[in-house]
Image: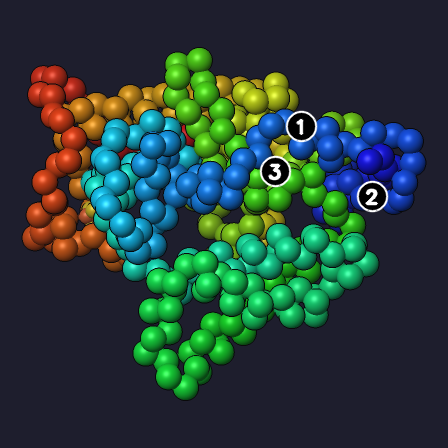
């Protein structure tokens, strides 16, 4: 398949290719196909695993918030890769990382996280339609069907609205999802976008052997080859002093793309549907090298904790949203027996000093 494409620009991002619009057939090779030849795609199963975070190939962990899979218990294996979410878990609280990655304790589905998944699905599916049909009413109309689909694929979500017999709370929740979808149209114009990739699973192995993986919401590629990585957030943009934490995930993806393709993405873009903000950052190679060093240090700390079983709780305000207080010593709980072989911690290892995103 061949196509002719034209570069388009969005207001507020002068000089940066917002996306590539397909304008009809022609003779130039389609860049979308070139991007698809990155070989970064994988099966739905792999994608789901990557949403989970770093897991072992032999025994994928259930998605946080998902009920444990039926059937025989999965073998417990040490983590072998890192995703932005799980890196964030370890930086927030090493014990939380253990509960999610090693013990794989189940977590209750949350309305906010599930709404985020629903909105992401709608935005992704909208691009299946011809550009001219990607309107806000059309996008809103996708919400109920995508919710049905999501519920069918994750039966545990039924418990979210089990105590809502008249459906009032569900109706409010769906209306909020529609509002978030609608707000996207004030921030981007999907009739002028032709993403090279959506929900793209990426995985790269660094020279050290550390595997990085994740799922990128959207990749735009200009005819010049410039790459823009886009991530949708259904929450509000953080205050400027916390922006670095939010950008960590994007720099992680940029590092993976750079390691896979040798291309430093031109722009990283966070689209906050909750507050109607767009945060962009144009990374340089030094940013990615810094993130790579950071991830190596993080991985070394995770590796030491895995071997020694020394996963320290780090209480913060975020504990209010932690599903594992019943197992956490900070809240009078006891962790389950450690399921991996132990090695004595080296004296003065200092394995779990506070680590920030950058
Ligand atoms: S309750 Fe807080 S300290 Fe305990 S595991 Fe959860 S996040 Fe960590």
Instruction: Name the residue tied to disc 1.
Output: 37
Q: Position of residue 269 (x, y in %)?
A: 60, 42
**Residue 262 vertical placement versus 112 (above, below):** above
Q: Nearer the viewer, residue 203 or 254?
A: 203
Q: Who comes first in sequence, dot 1 or dot 3? A: 1
Q: Residue furthest front?
A: 71
Q: Position of residue 97 (x, y in %)?
A: 27, 39
- The answer to whether 69 appears left or right of 191 in the picture is left
Q: Residue at x 49, y 24 (%)?
A: 204
Q: Who comes first in sequence, dot 2 or dot 1? A: 2
Q: Residues within 10 Å of mark 3 (few under 14, many from 20)?
A: many
As measured in the structure, the alpha-carbon distance from the residue carrying label 1 to the one carrying label 3 is 17 Å
- The answer to whether 335 appears left or right of 222 in the picture is left
**Could one spot residue 343 in this view of the protein?**
yes
Q: Who comes first in sequence, dot 2 or dot 3? A: 2
**Could one spot residue 97 in this view of the protein?**
no
Instruction: Name the residue tied to disc 2.
Output: 22
Q: Position of residue 357 (x, y in %)?
A: 39, 34
Q: Nearer the viewer, residue 26 or 229?
A: 26
User: What element does badge 1 sit on?
Assistant: loop
Q: Nearer the viewer, mark 2 or mark 1?
A: 1
Question: Quick check: is the Cβ at mark 2 less than 8 Å away from ligand 1?
Answer: no
Q: Which mark is residue 229?
A: 3
**Residue 19 vertical placement versus 135 (above, below):** above
């Amino acid at each position: 398949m061949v196509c002719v494409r034209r570069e388009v620009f969005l207001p507020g991002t002068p000089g940066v290719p917002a996306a590539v619009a397909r304008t009809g057939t022609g003779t130039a090779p389609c860049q979308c196909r070139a991007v698809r030849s990155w070989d970064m795609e994988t099966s739905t199963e792999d994608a789901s695993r990557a949403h989970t975070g770093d897991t072992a190939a032999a025994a994928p962990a259930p998605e946080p918030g998902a009920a444990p899979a039926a059937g025989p218990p999965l073998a417990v294996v040490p983590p072998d890769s890192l995703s932005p979410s799980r890196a964030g878990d370890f930086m927030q609280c090493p014990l939380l990382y253990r509960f999610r990655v090693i013990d794989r304790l189940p977590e209750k589905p949350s309305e906010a996280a599930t709404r985020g998944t629903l909105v992401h699905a709608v935005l992704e599916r909208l691009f299946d339609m011809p550009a001219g049909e990607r309107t806000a009413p059309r996008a809103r109309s996708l919400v109920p069907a995508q919710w049905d689909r999501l519920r069918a694929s994750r039966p545990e979500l039924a418990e979210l609205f089990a105590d809502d017999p008249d459906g009032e709370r569900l109706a409010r929740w769906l209306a909020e999802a529609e509002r978030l979808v609608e707000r996207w149209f004030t921030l981007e114009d999907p009739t002028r976008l032709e993403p090279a990739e959506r929900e793209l699973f990426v995985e790269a192995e660094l020279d050290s052997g550390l595997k990085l993986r994740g799922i990128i919401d959207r990749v735009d590629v200009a005819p010049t080859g410039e790459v823009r990585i886009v991530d949708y957030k259904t929450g509000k943009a953080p205050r400027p002093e916390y922006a670095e934490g939010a950008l960590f995930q994007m720099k992680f993806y940029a590092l993976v793309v750079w390691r896979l393709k040798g291309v430093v993405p031109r722009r990283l873009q966070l689209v906050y549907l909750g507050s109607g903000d767009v945060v962009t950052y144009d990374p340089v190679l030094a940013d990615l090298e810094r993130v790579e060093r950071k991830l190596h240090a993080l991985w070394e700390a995770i590796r030491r904790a895995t071997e020694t079983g020394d996963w320290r709780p780090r209480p913060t305000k975020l504990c209010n949203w932690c599903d594992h207080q019943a197992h956490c010593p900070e809240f009078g709980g006891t962790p389950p027996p450690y399921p991996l072989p132990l090695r004595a911690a080296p004296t003065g290892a200092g394995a779990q000093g506070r680590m920030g995103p950058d």
